[in-house]
C-alpha cells in the first residue's frame, strides 16, 4: 500500500513537470518518473521481506528479492546519464523556457517538405 | 541442377551487361541474347521429362528455421512461361541491338533487362512461396527502373506503376503468410497438394481475395488497368518484353498457379469472369479510341489480359488450356506488334496510326509482318489467335445455365472490337496511297526478331496440334488432374464456330463504319481517368498523413510527451476492464515507518512542482532523491540506497552547473497549461498507484530470486547478491547499460564544445566570468577542502570497488564516489580550467576492459562468463574472479561520464543546435570556415 501511494505521488509530480514547457522542468519530471519506476521495481519483488541480500550477514529466507534491486541499480545510473544529457541540452539552449522557445516551426514549410519528396 | 544453372546463366547477362556494352556498344544485345538461348537450351534439356509427367526439382537451404528454402521446380506451367520469358527475351535482346541509338546508355538497359528476366524466370520456377514472392517483387522493381529510365517525364508513370504493382506484391505476401498459417510450410508443391485444406479453412476466402488483388494489379485489370498504358513511356523493346509478353503475365501465372484450391468456387469464378470480361471489353473500346499505335497496343494488352483472367475464372480444364494457349499466342503477336511499332516509329518518325497509310508500298516486309501479327490478334483463321479465341468460346459456353451464353455474348462483342482495331492497323499498313516516299525497308537484322514470332503465330496456328503435349501438361500440372488438351484448327460445325463467324461479321461492320465510330469515340469516354483518380487518392493519403502528423509537428515538448502519458492511461483502462480477480497479498506489505517517508516525499514532490525558483526546485528534487534512497534502505536495498545517494549528490552538482546560466525563476505557466497538465498528472498518478497496488506483492518470492539467494555464493564466490547479479549473472545487461552511459557521455562531448578561453565575442562568455569573479572567495575554501578530501575519496572509491563482490559497493557505487572526487577537484578550479582526467580515454578504456573480461569468459563457455581462481602472491592469497575486471570496466565508464559532465557543463557551449539550424553554407562560407573548423578539431581532441 505504501509503495503504491509513493509511486502515485512520484508519477503525478513527474507527469505534471513533464508536460511543462522548458526542458529543465521536463528533466526534473523525468527524474521523478525514474524514482517512481525504481520504487515500482522493488515493489514488484515484494515488500514483505526487507533484509538486505548480503549473504554474509542475512539469512536468505528473509532477504529481499535481489533481482529487482540489480535492475533498479543500473536504472538509477542510467537515469543519471540521461538526466545529465537533458540538462546539458536545457542549459545550453539559451533561455529554455522563455516565451519564444514555445514558438512552433512553421507548419506550412514542414508540409511542403513532406509533400515534395 | 540444370534449373539452377539456367537461372545463373540468365543472371550472368546482368553481370556482363556493362563490360560487354563498353566493348560492343549496342551490339552487346547479340551475345546477351545468345545467353538467353543457352538458358532456354538448359531448360529444354529437361522439357522431355516434364512432358512425360515428371517434375524437375532443385533445393538449397535458405532459412531453415522457417522452413524457407531455395526451391525450384519445372512442371508444365513453369515450362510454358519459361519458354516465353527466355524465347521472347532472346528476341528482344537482339532487337535492342538494332533499335537502340548508338549513344544510348546500353549497359544500364541490358543490365536491367537481364535482371528482370532473371527475376521473371525465378518467379515461374520458384517452388517455395517466399521465394516466389521475392521474385515477384523483383520484377516490380526492375519494371520501375526500366520505366523510369526515360528522363524526368517518366518519373511519375514509373512511380504509379510501382505503387500499384507493389501493392499487389504486399497482397501476395499476405496471401502467402495466410497459406503458411494453414499448411505450416512454405513449400509451394506441398501447399498445393493440400488445396482442400486451404479452401476449407476460414482463411480461404481471404487468401483468394489477396491473390486476386495481387494478380489484378500486376496484370492491369480494372480498376488498376491505367498503369499499363501509362508505362508506355518506357522504351519500345521494354514495353514489348515487360508490358506485353512477360511482366504483366506474372499476375496470370499467379492465378494459374494458385488455381487448385479455388478453381470452381463460385466467388472465384464470379470475380474473375466478371472483372476479366469487363476489362476485356473496356480495354478493347479504349484501344479502338487510340491513334497512337503504342497506346493502342497497351489498351489491347489490357483487354487480352482480361480475356485470359476470365478464362482462368471459368476454371475447367478446357478453359485453363485455352488460358495457357492464349497466353502463348498473345505473347507472340503482341511482342511482334510492339517491335514493329518500334521499327515504324524509328523509320517513319511517327506512331500515329493515321500517318501509316501506304506503308506496304515503301516497306513491304515490315507491312507483311505487321499484317501477320494483326490477323492473329484479330482472330482470323488459320492463325493461332483464331484457335485460342474459338476454344475460348467453347470454354465460356461450359458455364452453367444461361450464364454460358451471356458470357460468350460479351466475349463476342469484345472480340469484335478487337477485330476492328486490328483491322485499323492492317488498313494503316496496306491501305491508302504512298504517303511517305522517302521511307525504305530497314535492314533484315532489325526485322528478324519481329519476324520470328510473327511467322510462329501462323505456323503454330496451322499446326496447333503440336502444342497439345505442352498445353495438356500445363493444365495437368496446374489443376493436378489427368486431362488431354484437344486443340485443333477445325472442330467441325459447333456453336463456337458460329460465334467466330458472328465476331468477324460484327468486326467487319465496325471496321466499315470506322468513320462514324471514330467520331463517336473521339471524346473522353469517362468523366475521369484512372490516373486522375490515382493522383487524387495519392494526394488524399498525403493529406491524411499530414493531418495525423500535425499534432507532433511542433518544437514544444508537451505535444510529444502527452501521448505516452495518455497511452499509460489507456493501459490502465484496459487493466481495470480485463484483469480479473486478484490473489490476496501473501504477507503484510506495509510497515508503519513507510508512511513517514511517503509523506515527506509528497511534500518534496509538491515543492518541486509548485516552486518557481530554479534553485528551490533543484533542492526539493534533491530532497526527494534522498528520501527515495531512504525508501530503498528500508526496503533492504543497501547498494541501491548508496547509489541513489551518490547520484543525487552528483545530479545536484550538475544541475547547479547548468542553472547558473539560466534565469533564477521559471517562467510562469499559463493557466490553460496548468489545468490540463494537473488533470493528466493526477490521472496518471492514480493509474500508476492502482497498478502497483493491484499487481505487486501478491506472490511468493520468484524462483529466480530463490536461486540467486540460495546458490549465488556457491556459483559466484560473492556474497553481495545484487553485485553478483550485475557482474556475474546478468553481465550482458550491465554491459549494455554501460554502453548507454558511454553514449550519453559521448553525446555530451559532441553537443558541448569547450569554450576557447579567449572567446570574448561569445555573447554569454561574460556571464560565467562575472559569476566566477564574485565567487572567488568560496572557491578558496572548496579548493582547500578538496586537497584534504580527494585522497580519502579516492581510497574509499577503490576500496568500494574491491569489496563490491561481497559487501555493499561495486563498480557503479565506487565510480560515483570517484565522480564526487572529480567534481570536488574540478569545480573550485573554475571555468576554463582543464581537467587532468580526460573523458574519452576513460570511456574507451572502460569499454575495452569490459569487452576483454567478456572475452576471457569465452575461453570457458560464453561471453562474460566469469572465471574463478585464487590469486597467490607469496603467502598472500585472495580468491579472485574475472568479474572484478568487468567491474573495473564499469567503474571507468561511469567515471568517464562524470568527467565529461563536469568538464563540459562547467565550460562547454552548445554547438550542435546552432550549426544544425543554419542554412547550408555557400562555398565561400565553407572556405572561410575551414580555419576555425581545424582549430575546433584540435580543441576537441
Image (spheres, rainbow, N blue to C red):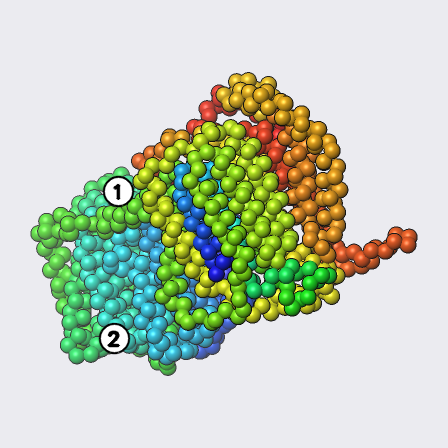
- Quadrant where the N terminus of chain B sits is bottom right
Q: Could you tell me which residue is drawn at 41 percent across and 71 percent down?
A: B581
On the image, the x and y values in percent for residue B248 come to 34, 58
As measured in the structure, the alpha-carbon distance from the residue carrying label 1 to the one carrying label 2 is: 47 Å
Q: Which of B164 and B807 is in front in this view?
A: B807
Asked if residue B911 is positioned above or below residue B50 in the image, the reply reads above
Q: SS class of the residue under badge 2?
A: helix
Label 2 crowd bin: few (<14), some (14–19), many (20+), radius 10 Å: few
Q: Position of residue B75 (x, y in %)?
A: 44, 72
Name the residue nearer the viewer: B375 or B609. Answer: B609
Residue corresponding to mark 1: B350
Q: In this view, does B434 lie above or below B309?
A: above
Chain of the residue on which disc 2 is drawn: B
Residue B701 % position (x, y): 58, 68
On the same chain, marks 1 and 2? The answer is yes
Horizontal placement of A66 versus B220: left or right? right
Query: Badge 2 is on which residue?
Result: B266
**Closer to the camera in the image, B166 or B386:** B166
Is B659 or B537 nearer to us in this picture? Answer: B659
Q: Earlier in the sequence, mark 1 or mark 2?
A: 2
Q: Which residue is drawn at 35% across and 56% down?
A: B167
Is residue B751 shown to the viewer in this render? Answer: no
Residues at discs 1 and 2 in contact (Cβ within 8 Å):
no
Name the residue: 10% across, 51% down.
B520
How many numbered marks are there?
2
**How many neighbours does mark 1 have within 10 angstroms: few (below 14), some (14-19), or many (20 or more)?**
some
> On the image, which quarter does residue B906 sit in?
top right
SS assignment at label 1: loop
Amino acid at each position: 500500500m505504501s509503495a503504491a501511494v509513493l509511486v502515485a505521488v512520484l508519477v503525478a509530480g513527474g507527469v505534471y513537470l513533464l508536460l511543462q514547457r522548458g526542458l529543465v522542468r521536463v528533466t526534473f519530471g523525468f527524474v521523478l518518473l525514474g524514482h517512481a519506476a525504481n520504487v515500482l521495481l522493488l515493489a514488484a519483488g515484494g515488500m514483505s521481506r526487507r533484509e538486505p541480500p548480503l549473504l554474509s550477514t542475512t539469512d536468505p529466507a528473509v532477504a529481499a528479492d535481489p533481482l529487482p534491486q540489480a535492475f533498479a541499480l543500473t536504472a538509477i545510473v542510467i537515469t543519471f546519464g540521461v538526466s545529465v544529457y537533458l540538462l546539458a541540452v536545457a542549459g545550453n539552449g539559451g533561455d529554455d523556457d522563455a516565451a519564444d522557445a514555445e514558438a512552433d516551426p512553421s507548419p506550412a514549410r514542414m508540409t511542403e517538405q513532406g509533400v515534395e519528396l | 541442377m540444370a534449373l539452377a544453372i539456367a537461372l545463373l546463366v540468365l543472371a550472368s547477362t546482368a553481370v556482363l551487361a556493362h563490360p560487354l556494352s563498353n566493348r560492343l556498344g549496342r551490339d552487346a544485345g547479340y551475345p546477351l541474347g545468345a545467353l538467353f538461348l543457352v538458358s532456354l537450351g538448359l531448360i529444354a534439356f529437361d522439357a522431355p521429362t516434364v512432358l512425360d509427367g515428371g517434375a524437375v526439382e532443385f533445393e538449397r537451404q535458405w532459412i531453415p528455421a522457417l522452413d524457407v528454402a531455395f526451391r525450384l521446380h519445372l512442371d508444365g506451367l513453369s515450362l510454358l512461361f519459361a519458354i516465353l520469358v527466355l524465347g521472347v527475351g532472346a528476341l528482344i535482346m537482339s532487337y535492342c541491338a538494332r533499335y537502340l541509338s548508338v549513344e544510348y546508355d546500353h549497359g544500364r538497359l541490358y543490365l536491367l533487362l537481364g535482371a528482370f528476366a532473371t527475376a521473371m524466370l525465378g518467379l515461374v520456377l520458384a517452388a517455395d512461396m517466399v521465394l516466389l514472392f521475392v521474385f515477384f517483387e523483383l520484377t516490380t522493381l526492375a519494371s520501375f527502373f526500366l520505366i523510369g529510365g526515360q528522363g524526368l517525364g517518366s518519373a511519375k508513370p514509373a512511380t504509379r506503376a510501382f505503387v500499384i504493382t507493389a501493392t499487389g506484391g504486399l497482397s501476395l505476401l499476405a496471401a502467402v503468410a495466410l497459406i503458411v498459417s494453414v499448411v505450416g510450410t512454405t513449400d509451394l508443391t506441398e501447399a498445393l497438394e493440400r488445396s482442400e485444406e486451404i479452401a476449407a479453412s476460414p482463411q480461404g476466402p481471404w487468401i483468394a481475395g489477396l491473390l486476386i488483388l495481387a494478380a489484378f494489379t500486376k496484370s492491369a485489370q480494372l480498376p488498376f488497368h491505367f498503369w499499363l498504358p501509362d508505362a508506355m513511356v518506357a522504351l519500345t523493346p521494354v514495353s514489348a518484353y515487360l508490358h506485353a509478353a512477360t511482366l504483366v503475365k506474372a499476375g496470370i501465372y499467379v492465378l494459374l498457379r494458385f488455381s487448385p484450391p479455388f478453381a470452381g468456387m463460385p466467388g472465384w469464378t464470379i470475380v474473375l469472369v466478371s472483372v476479366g470480361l469487363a476489362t476485356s471489353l473496356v480495354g478493347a473500346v479504349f484501344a479502338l479510341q487510340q491513334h497512337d499505335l503504342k497506346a493502342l497496343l497497351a489498351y489491347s494488352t489490357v483487354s487480352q489480359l482480361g480475356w485470359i483472367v476470365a478464362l482462368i475464372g471459368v476454371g475447367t480444364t478446357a478453359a485453363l488450356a485455352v488460358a495457357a494457349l492464349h497466353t502463348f499466342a498473345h505473347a507472340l503477336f503482341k511482342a511482334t506488334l510492339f517491335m514493329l511499332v518500334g521499327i515504324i516509329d524509328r523509320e517513319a518518325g511517327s506512331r500515329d496510326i493515321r500517318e501509316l497509310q501506304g506503308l506496304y508500298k515503301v516497306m513491304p516486309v515490315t507491312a507483311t509482318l505487321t499484317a501477320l501479327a494483326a490477323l492473329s490478334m484479330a482472330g482470323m483463321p488459320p492463325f493461332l489467335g483464331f484457335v485460342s479465341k474459338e476454344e475460348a468460346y467453347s470454354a465460356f459456353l461450359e458455364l452453367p445455365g444461361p450464364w454460358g451464353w451471356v458470357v460468350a455474348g460479351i466475349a463476342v462483342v469484345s472480340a469484335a472490337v478487337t477485330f476492328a482495331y486490328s483491322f485499323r492497323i492492317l488498313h494503316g499498313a496496306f491501305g491508302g496511297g504512298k504517303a511517305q516516299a522517302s521511307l525504305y525497308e530497314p535492314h533484315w537484322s532489325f526485322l528478324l526478331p519481329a519476324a520470328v514470332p510473327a511467322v510462329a503465330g501462323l505456323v503454330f496456328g496451322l499446326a496447333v496440334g503440336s502444342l497439345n503435349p505442352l498445353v495438356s501438361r500445363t493444365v495437368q500440372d496446374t489443376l493436378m488432374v489427368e486431362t488431354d488438351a484437344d486443340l485443333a484448327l477445325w472442330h467441325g460445325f459447333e456453336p463456337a464456330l458460329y460465334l467466330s463467324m458472328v465476331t468477324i461479321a460484327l468486326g467487319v461492320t465496325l471496321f466499315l463504319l470506322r468513320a462514324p465510330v471514330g467520331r463517336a469515340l473521339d471524346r473522353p469516354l469517362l468523366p475521369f481517368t484512372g490516373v486522375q483518380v490515382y493522383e487524387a487518392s495519392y494526394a488524399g493519403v498525403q493529406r491524411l498523413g499530414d493531418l495525423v502528423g500535425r499534432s507532433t509537428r511542433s518544437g514544444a515538448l508537451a505535444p510529444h510527451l502527452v501521448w505516452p502519458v495518455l497511452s499509460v492511461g489507456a493501459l490502465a483502462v484496459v487493466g481495470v476492464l480485463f484483469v480479473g480477480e486478484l490473489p490476496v497479498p501473501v504477507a503484510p506489505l506495509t510497515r508503519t515507518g513507510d508512511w513517514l517517508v511517503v509523506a515527506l516525499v509528497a511534500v518534496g514532490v509538491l515543492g518541486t512542482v509548485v516552486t518557481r525558483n530554479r534553485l528551490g526546485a533543484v533542492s526539493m528534487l534533491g530532497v526527494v532523491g534522498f528520501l527515495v534512497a531512504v525508501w530503498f534502505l528500508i526496503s533492504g536495498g543497501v547498494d541501491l540506497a548508496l547509489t541513489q545517494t551518490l547520484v543525487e549528490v552528483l545530479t545536484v552538482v550538475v544541475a547547479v552547473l547548468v542553472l547558473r546560466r539560466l534565469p533564477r525563476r521559471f517562467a510562469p505557466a499559463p493557466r490553460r497549461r496548468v489545468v490540463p497538465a494537473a488533470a493528466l498528472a493526477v490521472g496518471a498518478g492514480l493509474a500508476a498507484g492502482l497498478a502497483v497496488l493491484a499487481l505487486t506483492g501478491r506472490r511468493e518470492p520468484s524462483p529466480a530470486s530463490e536461486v540467486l539467494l540460495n546458490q549465488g555464493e556457491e556459483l559466484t564466490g560473492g556474497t553481495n547478491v545484487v553485485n553478483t547479479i550485475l557482474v556475474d549473472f546478468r553481465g550482458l545487461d550491465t554491459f549494455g547499460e554501460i554502453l548507454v552511459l558511454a553514449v550519453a557521455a559521448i553525446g555530451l562531448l559532441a553537443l558541448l564544445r569547450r569554450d576557447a578561453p579567449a572567446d570574448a565575442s561569445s555573447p554569454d562568455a561574460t556571464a560565467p566570468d562575472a559569476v566566477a569573479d564574485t565567487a572567488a572567495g568560496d572557491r578558496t575554501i572548496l579548493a582547500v577542502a578538496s586537497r584534504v578530501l580527494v585522497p580519502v575519496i579516492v581510497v574509499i572509491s577503490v576500496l568500494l570497488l574491491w569489496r563490491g563482490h561481497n559487501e555493499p559497493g561495486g563498480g557503479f557505487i565506487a565510480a560515483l564516489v570517484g565522480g564526487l572526487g572529480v567534481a570536488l577537484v574540478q569545480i573550485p578550479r573554475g571555468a576554463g580550467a582543464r581537467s587532468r582526467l580526460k573523458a574519452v580515454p576513460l570511456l574507451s578504456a572502460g569499454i575495452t576492459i569490459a569487452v576483454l573480461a567478456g572475452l576471457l569468459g569465452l575461453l570457458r563457455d560464453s561471453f562474460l562468463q566469469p572465471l574463478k581462481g585464487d590469486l597467490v602472491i607469496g603467502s598472500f592469497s585472495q580468491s579472485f574472479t574475472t568479474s572484478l575486471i568487468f567491474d573495473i570496466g564499469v567503474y571507468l565508464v561511469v567515471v568517464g561520464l562524470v568527467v565529461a559532465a563536469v568538464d563540459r557543463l562547467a565550460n562547454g557551449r552548445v554547438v550542435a543546435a546552432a550549426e544544425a539550424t543554419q542554412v547550408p553554407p555557400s562555398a565561400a562560407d565553407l572556405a572561410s570556415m575551414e580555419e576555425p573548423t581545424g582549430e575546433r578539431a584540435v580543441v576537441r581532441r
